[in-house]
Image (cartoon, helix red, strand yellow):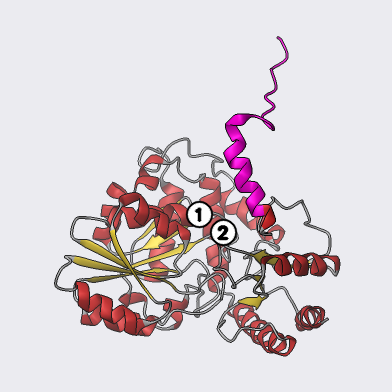
Amino acid sequence: MSEPEIMNAENDLRIDGFSAVLDDYEREGRLRHLPPHRAGQGLIDLTGNDYLGLAARQEEFREEYARRFGEASMTSSASRLLATDQKIYADYEGLLEGLYGRPALLFNSGYHANMGITRALALPGTVFLSDKLIHASAIDGLRMKGTECDRWRHNDPGHLRKLLEKYAGKAERMVVIAESVYSMDGDLAPLEELAALREEFPNMLLYIDEAHGFGVFGKYGLGLAEERGLLGKIDILMATLGKAGASAGAFAVTSRRMKDYLVNAARPLIFSTALPPANVAWSHLMTEKITGMEKERRHLRELASRLRAGLRDAGGGSEISGSQIVPFITGDARKATRLAAKLEAEGILASAIRRPTVPPGGERLRLSLNALLSEIDIDNITEKLKE
């Protein structure tokens, strides 16, 4: 067999336009790179979303997993609608239904879920009213369908009310989309006010993304909606399993009829190979562990409060965060990347966040805490930032 011809496109005219974009990114200090392997190097890691520390502790659970789920297949080999082995999926959805009190539907990722659900909801006569800071996955779903969409000022239920009044007599249904915990500022949605508006406007559907709330809030870790006693007031609740869940995938909790509709209309579910049963089994085990981790949730809240207080003294703190995500604002992309590099040299990993993830002037370090950190770690982080 002859050696394969190797394509060298570094100077190919076909990619000139793309290279120019990369050059612009580099000049602006926002060129991204896949990071090197740094696990096991004794670093304090503030870059991930392993909020409860379950992913870091996974070796503790392997024996139980092997005993209970050791026969689970490593591949589904088909979409969920075609897979012959449905038991593990059904068992996990049954666990979620028992916890949330309503049917649940698995998706391959939070991106698949948000994009697929928003697109599926876009029937004629529907208007979407989204918080300005909803995740890109939901935005992409709305753009793909070309739906009618209006945005309300971030966490401003008064502005949302005005939009609801504007569209109430025109639209057959109004879908309000918000996140419970926002991933960049760590601030919390005004869920009580949103639920009250849902009661006031009978053609309003409330869709809440609990990606960063699942595992962290609530007595059983079901999210901010559980903590606020509002699970029954949300029409569609989506949560991801790759953050506090220490696994991969996502799920939506909704009514029986809406679940049936999404099975028939959510294209990422219909046309993607389903998650491996072994992965779903691991999610099942991790979710069981999450329900009993109130001690870790309390510790995480205390750590976040301590860090916020320390950052205020360091001059870059934000009063917005109410969660395990704490931003340190730099206001400049190059400052953020330089500061991240200096912290790494001191043994602390922190993500430099630049536009378009945040607007110009919102550049920052995103400090993502987990329950395995100690108060000493938090004080160390604060002191390094002060320096």
* Dot 2 crowding, Cα within 10 Å, few <14, some 14–19, many 20+: some
Q: Is residue 245 visible?
A: yes
Instruction: Decide if residue 65 is on the left or right side of residue 197.
Output: right
Q: Is residue 107 above or below residue 201?
A: above
Residue in front for this viewpoint, 50 or 361: 361
Q: Is residue 259 above or below residue 215?
A: above
x then y, percent, for residue 93: 41, 58
Q: Distance from label 1 to label 2 (Cα)?
A: 6 Å
Residue in front for this viewpoint, 14 or 145: 14
* Dot 1 crowding, Cα within 10 Å, few <14, some 14–19, many 20+: many
x then y, percent, for residue 293: 59, 75
Q: Which residues are magenta?
A: 1-25
Residue drawn at x 52%, y 44% is: 276
Residue drawn at x 83%, y 60% is: 41
Q: Which residue is mark 2?
A: 242
Instruction: Tell me the number on the disc at residue 249.
Output: 1
Q: Is residue 150 above or below residue 24?
A: below
Q: Is residue 225 magenta?
A: no
Q: Amino acid at mark 1?
A: Gly
Residue drawn at x 83%, y 64% is: 42
Quarter of the view holding residue 255 = bottom left
Q: Residue furthest top?
A: 1
The C terminus - image quarter: bottom right
Q: Residue furthest left?
A: 169
Residue drawn at x 35%, y 82% is: 157
| Nearest to N terminus: mark 1 or mark 2 | 2
Instruction: Decide if residue 38 is on the left or right side of residue 84.
Output: right
Circle 1/circle 2 CB separation < 8 Å: yes
